[in-house]
């Protein structure tokens, strides 16, 4: 009879290990910490699905709750269990810009008569997660930027899925950006009009790139962003079979099928289309809407360095599904996919910083955008982290603090310090 408890314990242990463990590349540091973070992420998604099935709460509201409740009072690099103390002197205000909720971080007073930097930041979260600054790592980052760089930081609380779809989040961010860039508001916050940046991570990087393109090409906006800083941005929907999508499709925390689902949700499309997009049926060579010129803008065989192309081959199907583009017009909209913008649009973009990670499905989006911007005459800095993975920029506060997270954030801060 004693054998039963032993077998039960062994079975549970093996099952738990099977659930938790995932193979990771040797280059990723602190692999077991990432494995545990990935397991926690999967568990939260499963629990949210269960809550939704039981009728307890909406799915995304359930997922948002643990994320938004993180303590964001600490400063980047503070690893104390309490989350650290509030950054001294940084004033935080929740207001609206053009009707869009924003959180404004003002640096400590001092140096009267000297204008300050300005930074508009769009948080990530796959156009579905996020919050009014309670999202711990974004709040900690904004406080640090404001304090260390003497910068007025504006975090935009754009509307999210499932309440809205594209182009609403983009339009929210654009409206807030135009309000921020008005000379009256810049003067109110003592911001130098020549030192204003826009930035964002992941899907927030998508929004930052799209807004920067529109602002740069809008002659009615007199003050422009002087630079853009994009953190592993999602930039295109034509090819979900780039080398990085294939190489990193099983690397946490952003898996290839999951990213396609996020795109479909953002664009207001049926999730049943996911298998079609995974095999590039939406961008087949027979689609008249996908011209050779448009396809060339995401041609990784030309735009990527040889080290990232490796032995991968492009997947361009013949017939595909011609109706997909008509069914989901946002697939070809440059406001959703900034990499699809023409060279005449890119040429007017500001000086650019793009952070990419080797073990990230979105790696090639960032690398291709860097190349296209450079070809259009824009000065670009590409910080590439060989041991980086998607989400590491956010893993800067306890209990999910990674060494690579601290390094990528420090590199980002140093670039802003030297260029903004």
Image (spheres, grey):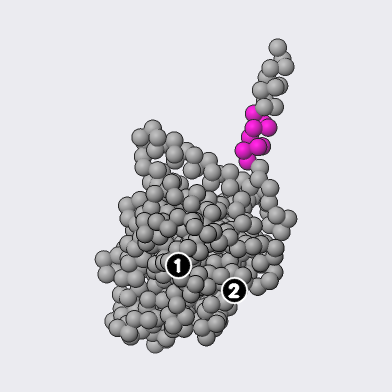
Residue under pointer 2? 303
Magenta segment range?
A: 12-20
Q: Secondary structure at mark 2?
A: helix
The residue depicted at 53 percent of the width and 59 percent of the height is 318
Q: Secondary structure at mark 1?
A: loop
State the image coordinates of residue 81 (x, y, percent, origin top left).
56, 51
The residue depicted at 52 percent of the width and 86 percent of the height is 377
Between the C-alphas of marks 1 and 2, the distance is 18 Å
State the image coordinates of residue 51 (x, y, percent, origin top left).
41, 36
- Residue 74 lies, with reference to residue 21, above or below; the image says below
Residue under pointer 1? 290
Asked if the magenta segment contains residue 376, the reply would be: no
Horizontal side of residue 224 vs 141, given as left or right: left
Q: Say whether residue 252 is visible.
A: yes
Decide which of 257, 89 is in the foreground and name it. Answer: 257
Neighbour tally class for label 1: few under 14, some 14-19, many 20 plus, Cα within 10 Å: some
Instruction: State the residue lying farthest toward the left.
Output: 99
- Residue 213 lies, with reference to residue 53, above or below; the image says below
């Amino acid at each position: 009879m004693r054998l039963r408890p032993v077998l039960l314990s062994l079975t549970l242990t093996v099952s738990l290990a099977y659930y938790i463990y995932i193979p990771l590349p040797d280059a990723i540091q602190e692999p077991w910490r990432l494995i545990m973070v990935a397991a926690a992420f999967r568990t939260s998604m499963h629990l949210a699905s269960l809550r939704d099935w039981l009728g307890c709460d909406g799915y995304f509201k359930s997922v948002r709750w643990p994320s938004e409740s993180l303590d964001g009072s600490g400063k980047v690099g503070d690893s104390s269990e309490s989350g650290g103390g509030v950054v001294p002197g940084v004033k935080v205000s929740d207001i609206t810009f053009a009707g869009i909720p924003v959180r404004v971080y003002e640096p400590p007073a001092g140096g009267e008569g000297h204008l300050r930097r300005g930074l508009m930041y769009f948080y990530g979260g796959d156009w579905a997660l996020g919050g009014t600054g309670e999202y711990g790592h974004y709040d900690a980052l904004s406080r640090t930027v404001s304090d260390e760089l003497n910068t007025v930081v504006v975090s935009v609380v754009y509307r999210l899925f499932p309440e809205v779809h594209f182009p609403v989040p983009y339009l929210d961010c654009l409206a807030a950006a135009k309000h921020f860039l008005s000379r009256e508001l810049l003067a109110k916050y003592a911001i130098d009009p020549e030192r204003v940046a826009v930035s964002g991570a992941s899907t927030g990087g998508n929004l930052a790139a799209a807004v920067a393109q529109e602002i740069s090409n809008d002659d009615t906006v007199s003050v422009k962003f002087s630079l853009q800083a994009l953190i592993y941005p999602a930039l295109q929907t034509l090819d979900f079979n780039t080398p990085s999508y294939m190489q990193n499709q099983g690397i946490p925390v952003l898996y290839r099928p999951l990213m396609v689902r996020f795109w479909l949700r953002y664009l207001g499309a049926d999730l049943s289309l996911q298998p079609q997009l995974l095999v590039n049926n939406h961008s087949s060579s027979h689609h008249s809407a996908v011209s050779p010129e448009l396809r060339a803008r995401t041609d990784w065989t030309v735009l990527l360095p040889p080290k990232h192309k490796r032995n991968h081959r492009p997947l361009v199907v013949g017939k595909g599904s011609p109706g997909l583009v008509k069914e989901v017009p946002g697939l070809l909209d440059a406001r959703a996919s900034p990499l699809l913008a023409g060279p005449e649009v890119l040429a007017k973009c500001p000086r650019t910083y793009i952070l990419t990670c080797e073990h990230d499905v979105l790696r090639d989006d960032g690398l291709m955008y860097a190349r296209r911007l450079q070809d259009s005459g824009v000065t670009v800095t590409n910080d590439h982290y060989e041991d980086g993975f998607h989400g590491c920029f956010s893993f800067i506060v306890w209990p999910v603090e990674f060494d690579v997270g601290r390094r990528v954030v420090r590199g980002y801060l140093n670039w802003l310090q030297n260029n903004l």
